[in-house]
Image: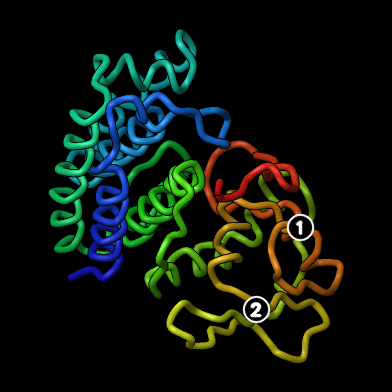
Amino acid sequence: MLQQALDFREESDAVFVLLDGLDDQDWGRKTQFKEWTLNDIVAHLHMGDYAADLSLQDTSAFLDLVKEFATGRKQYGLLAFTHVWLDGLRDRALLQRWHTFSLEMAERFAVADPKKRVQWFGPDMSVRSSITARLMETWAHSQAIYDLLGQTRTNTDRIKNIVVMGMNTFGWTFTNRKLAVPTDGPYLRLNAPSGEIWEWNRPDQADRIEGSAVEFCQVVTQVRNIADTSLEVSGATATRWMALAQCFAGPPEEPPAPGSRFTLV
């Protein structure tokens, strides 16, 4: 069984529990992420899951979806097209469809060959990377929901998948912005939710990032500005990376402005 698929399922379950008790009027509330509503976020997650699952099962059908997506994005814009694609499905009906599909999808990925290459909107990737990206997206986008509802997420060590993705996309952050990639990545020492210490690269390096694994994940997924964390960052390379970090595909995105993303009280 592919562990990342099981982790994705657990993260999806946690978000479902968070949303399952909401009242009808809550679904139209705007979050701090581009003023997307809860409906917008769940719709976006479902479309991404559907596309990833299709890439696993039927490459030809996935490529057709890519063409449909490109046309719809030009005509409507990303978010509006997503709702058109869903035929206006919203609120609890949307939540149920997303959650049911995520569980079914997790089962298919769990038994797939983790090294198999699958298509995506950008470069192709392994099955393991594909489902890890879905875990990352679910975790990152749901942060806006936790913030809006004034809830503090209970994280587990499954976020190590996101830390690894953050480390693996060190070079991508710079390449995506047409910047020279630094020769060496910084030393990383993070405190996991379990209390375990996670380390990467050489501890004798001048460039260092130390502190909370949760906060590191928040920075590389761009749900928090580095200034709003307690991470200890030293060295020019580490400082520059944390100011630009982007572990997800697509054109360069700017991190949220300092103080703009936080948990409401």
Residue occupying the point 45% across, 72% down? 160
Q: Is residue 203 left or right of residue 160?
A: right
Q: Is residue 50 left or right of residue 224?
A: left
Q: Identify the residue position indicated by label 2 in the image.
A: 188
Q: Nearer the viewer, residue 195 or 187?
A: 195
Give the distance between the C-alpha atoms of the residues marked 2 and 1, in whole angstroms: 18 Å
> Splitting the image into 4 quarters, where does residue 46 fall?
top left
Residue occupying the point 70% across, 70% down? 231
User: Residue 21 appears at what percent x and percent y?
Assistant: 25, 43
Q: Secondary structure at mark 1?
A: helix
Quadrant for the N terminus, please. Answer: bottom left
> Splitting the image into 4 quarters, where does residue 213 fall?
bottom right
Relative to 153, does residue 193 appear above or below in the rendering? below
Q: Nearer the viewer, residue 22 or 261?
A: 22
User: Residue 95 appears at what percent x and percent y?
Assistant: 23, 36
Q: Identify the residue position indicated by label 1 in the image.
A: 227
What's the image's color scheme?
A: rainbow
Q: Nearer the viewer, residue 114 or 217?
A: 217
Q: Secondary structure at mark 2?
A: strand
Badge 2 amino acid = Leu
